[in-house]
Amino acid sequence: MNSVLYRHGDSAVHRARPEIKIVAAFLAVLCVVATPRTAFWAFGVDALVLLIVWTVATVPLGWFARRALIELPFVVLALLLPFTGGGERVAVLGIPLSVDGLLAGWNIVVKGTLGVLISLTLAATTHPRDLIVGLQRLRVPVLLTTIASLMLRYVEVIAAEARRMRQARLCRGHDPRFLWQAGATARGMGTLFLRSFERGERVHLAMLARGWTGTMPMPPAARAGGSSWLAGLTPALVMAAAGGCALWTV
């Protein structure tokens, strides 16, 4: 099971227990969201913590920068808020901008960026298979972990099927650059959905024939000790301390 986000490594971050990293990422996102938007120094602390984690994990900064571009639509929205917001206005380079709009745009950009980077950090240092195991150890409902596991296992199969269908259309003269051929693309997506549904039915019947009981097997492992939890949660605890101080001083 390969992943376009996972980067193989042997750092302390890679070797940490997946359930600890999942809890740490979840707590870190909560801390970022709860931090007041005017606590600029607290967001600086959060970014510094992430930089330290990346350094330990030996994941280059450019890797995160390229994949963080997924949030560009939200950045565009945030850039419009200073011009469309109401309330008090301030002149920046001779352009009147809304103070509330500036703060709202900053809030969206900084929290969205940090949230995306935290998620990318978890994905880059934890194999998808280990993520499922971590969720199982955290007692996440069996139905959710089963769906996630099957999705990760067969997403590449569906992607390969989509590539074959696209290649077949191109061999028959289809050119997706023309607007009037959007209908063929839409029909191809519908066909892919039906094929995926039928494949899922066949896989489910095959699993039942082999004694499927509704639960994914979980590899045996010793429980994580207190020192492992403390080490893994340290970045999130630092973010929590920064956010707590920011809330206290507001």
Image (cartoon, grey):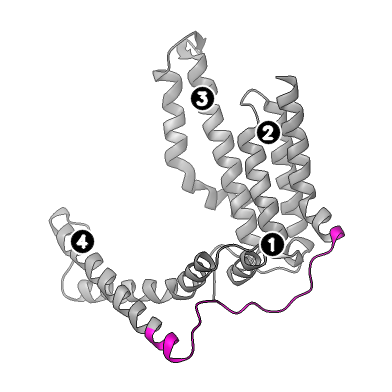
Q: Which mark is residue 43?
A: 2
Tell me if 52 is positioned left or right of 43 in this view: right
Pinpoint residue 25: horizontal percent, then vertical percent: 66, 51
Q: Quadrant of residue 246?
A: top right
CB atoms at circles 2 and 3 under 8 Å apart? no
Pick whichever, 159 or 221, lies toward us: 221
Kind of element beneath mark 2: helix
Report the Cα–Cα distance between label 3 and label 4.
37 Å
What's the distance in space between the residues labelled 2 and 3, CA to CA? 15 Å
- The residue that label 1 is drawn on is 19
Q: In the image, is residue 112 above or below residue 156?
A: above
* Residue furthest out toward the left: 180
- Give the side of residue 157 with respect to residue 111, left or right: left
Question: Is residue 94 shown in magenta?
Answer: no
The label shown at residue 104 is 3
| Lower sequence index among marks 2 and 3 | 2
Residue bounds of the magenta highlight: 205-227
